[in-house]
Image: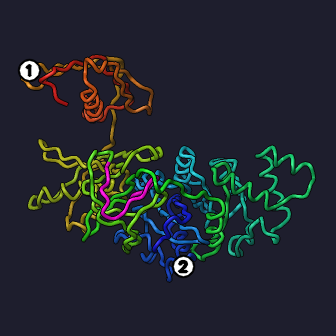
């Protein structure tokens, strides 16, 4: 598991609609790479990346899992993500820290709802993507139909680089179209697909001069690593067919993770889990710099310092101390108390944008027996909300009610299992209610003045305007710093989103522009 300092690295997320065979593909990748000595199975609950008890029992991935291995001298960090829509928040967080992606499609079902959603997020972030068409041996498997559907619903720039051999039960594998053994007609289709998308190649193709396959393949690699073209390969993960070719394609067509290891630290926490003996585990993708054991680290988001006690690689419940985390790599950092998902470590300059996929649609009330300790239940769900912020556990003190937000019923079943296994708590959930949001119907003004009692003196005036659907909150200030000092303006900007968590009807207020138009402070009696 030990990784070489300064090694070439690829950070790959593996994504799919539920039941397309994503975790099985991951398991065979780990086996073929020599990372594991025996194959596990999703159905029997022995897959390495399904480490939670509930994942083994249910045969579904609930949490994004990290595995590291080497292939042909390249270190690969592979993140296996959940396929079920109820756990879309895990997919969303993984997308943010990946440099490239494998999208698994079923040769029978083709492009499904979540496949398309993930694809759109990958394109928004410009992440180079490889398509793996799985289950080629199934009755009804049709590689041509899947290609046509993928080009129609995902991208016209998806280009097969393999030729499947056999169909359905007779499927025996695929041949690389760049190899001499490939069918001449199929290779011609590949070359024509490239020529159609590049004027220089088209000119060479039409000139009739001999084709230098190495040159054309190099072009395909460059275009794929920059996210212009999307190679498609085939296989049957459950039988190990096409796995080594998939690994080869990842090394050939994916870009290497970059980053200046000597620069200032810039990283992001994309996942939080807990270790029974060592406490909070912060999964960190580092973009710049190097972090070592016992370093003092700035949590930029919370503006606090934290001491790194250990840096470890964690896989399926196994951990190994690696001592350092370099730019371009992913590892788990221990010792950062209070760290949360989304926290920026060091400076934010190198952190990429995120793609929002998951929006909880339902809110439910949590019930428990009167003899149970309220604080224990509230604390447990707040810990789980640290691991998945979209749960947004809220304790309503006056009503003495605990509410959480969820994506769907399977998530509730999983929460029930985790609460019982990890915390020995038995709870029930009320009937889910649809989450509504509020938005202003027309422009208006907000005014507030604190002039007594001292020392709380402040005057604020806001212009509030409706925004287009999906715009969220847009905040601005036109107040001079001489009228309201910058530290007071910063505090106002920080508090406005909090104030909008509950509108006139008790729901979050969104799709609006709030502009601070007037502000006054007192030289002695004003505080942030």
Residue 293 drawn at (x, y percent): 33, 65
Question: Magenta-highlighted stretch: main secondary structure?
Answer: strand
Q: How many marks?
A: 2
Q: Secondary structure at mark 2?
A: loop
Q: Residue at x 71, y 75 (%)?
A: 170
Residue found farthest to the right: 208
Instruction: Tell whether 498 sits left or right of 455.
Output: right
Q: CA distance from mark 1 to mark 2?
A: 71 Å
Categorize mark 2 by other alpha carbons within 10 Å: few (<14), some (14-19), many (20+): few
Q: Where 335 falls versus 366 (above or below)?
A: below
Q: Residue at x 52, y 48 (%)?
A: 117
Assess whether residue 264 is covered by the magenta stretch. Answer: no
Query: Which quadrant holds residue 224?
Result: bottom right
Q: Image quadrant of residue 272?
A: bottom left
Q: Nearer the viewer, residue 105 or 198?
A: 198
- Tell me, yes or no, if residue 402 can be seen here: yes
Disc 2: which residue: 34
For marks 1 and 2, the one nearer the N-term is 2
The image position of residue 312, as x and y in percent, is 37, 68
Q: Residue 388 appears in which quarter of the rendering?
A: bottom left
Instruction: Look at mark 1 in the image and give the residue it sits on.
Output: 452
- The percent coordinates of residue 458 (x first, y second) are 17, 21
Label 1 secondary element: loop
Q: Nearer the viewer, residue 385 or 322?
A: 322
**Residue 400 falls left or right of residue 125:** left
Residue 292 sits inside the magenta stretch: yes
Magenta span of residues? 284-299
């Amino acid at each position: 598991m030990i990784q070489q300092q300064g090694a070439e690295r690829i950070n790959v997320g593996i994504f799919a609609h539920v039941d397309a065979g994503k975790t099985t593909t991951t398991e065979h990748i780990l086996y073929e790479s020599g990372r594991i000595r025996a194959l596990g199975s999703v159905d029997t609950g022995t897959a390495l990346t399904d480490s939670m008890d509930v994942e083994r029992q249910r045969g579904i991935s609930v949490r994004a899992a990290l595995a590291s291995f080497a292939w042909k001298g390249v270190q690969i960090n592979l993140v296996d993500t959940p396929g079920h829509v109820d756990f879309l928040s895990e997919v969303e967080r993984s997308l943010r820290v990946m440099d490239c992606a494998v999208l698994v499609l079923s040769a029978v079902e083709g492009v499904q709802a979540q496949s398309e959603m993930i694809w759109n997020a990958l394109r928004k972030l410009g992440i180079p993507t490889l398509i793996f068409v799985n289950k080629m041996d199934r009755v009804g498997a049709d590689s041509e139909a899947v290609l046509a559907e993928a080009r129609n619903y995902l991208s016209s720039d998806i280009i097969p680089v393999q030729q499947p051999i056999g169909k359905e039960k007779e499927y025996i594998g695929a041949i690389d179209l760049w190899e001499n053994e490939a069918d001449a007609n199929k290779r011609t289709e590949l070359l024509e697909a490239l020529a159609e998308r590049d004027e220089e190649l088209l000119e060479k193709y039409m000139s009739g001069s001999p084709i230098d396959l190495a040159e054309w393949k190099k072009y395909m690699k460059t275009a794929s690593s920059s996210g212009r073209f999307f190679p498609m390969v085939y296989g049957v993960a459950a039988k190990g067919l096409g796995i080594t070719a998939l690994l080869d394609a990842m090394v050939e067509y994916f870009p290497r993770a970059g980053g200046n290891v000597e620069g200032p630290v810039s990283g992001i926490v994309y996942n939080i889990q807990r270790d029974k003996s060592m406490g909070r585990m912060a999964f960190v993708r580092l973009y710049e710099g190097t972090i070592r054991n016992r370093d003092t680290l700035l949590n930029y988001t919370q503006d606090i310092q934290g001491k790194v006690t250990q840096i470890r690689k964690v896989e399926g419940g196994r951990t190994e101390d690696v001592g350092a985390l370099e730019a371009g790599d992913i590892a788990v950092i221990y010792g950062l108390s209070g760290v949360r998902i989304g926290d920026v470590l060091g400076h934010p300059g190198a952190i990429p944008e995120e793609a929002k996929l998951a929006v909880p649609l339902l809110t439910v009330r949590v019930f428990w027996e009167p003899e149970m300790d309220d604080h224990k239940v509230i604390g447990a769900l707040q810990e789980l909300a640290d691991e998945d912020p979209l749960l947004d556990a809220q304790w309503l003190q006056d009503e003495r009610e605990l509410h959480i937000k969820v994506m769907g019923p399977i998530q509730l079943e999983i929460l029930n299992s985790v609460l019982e296994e990890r915390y020995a708590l038995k709870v029930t959930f009320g009937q889910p209610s649809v989450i509504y949001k509020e938005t202003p119907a027309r422009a208006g003004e907000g005014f507030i003045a604190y002039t007594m009692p001292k020392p709380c003196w402040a005057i604020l005036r806001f212009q509030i305007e409706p925004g287009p659907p999906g715009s969220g909150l847009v905040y601005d200030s036109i107040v001079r710093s001489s009228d309201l000092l910058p530290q007071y303006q910063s505090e106002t900007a920080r508090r406005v989103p909090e104030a909008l968590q509950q509108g006139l009807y008790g729901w979050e207020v969104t799709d609006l522009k709030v502009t601070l138009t007037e502000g006054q402070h007192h030289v002695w009696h004003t505080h942030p």
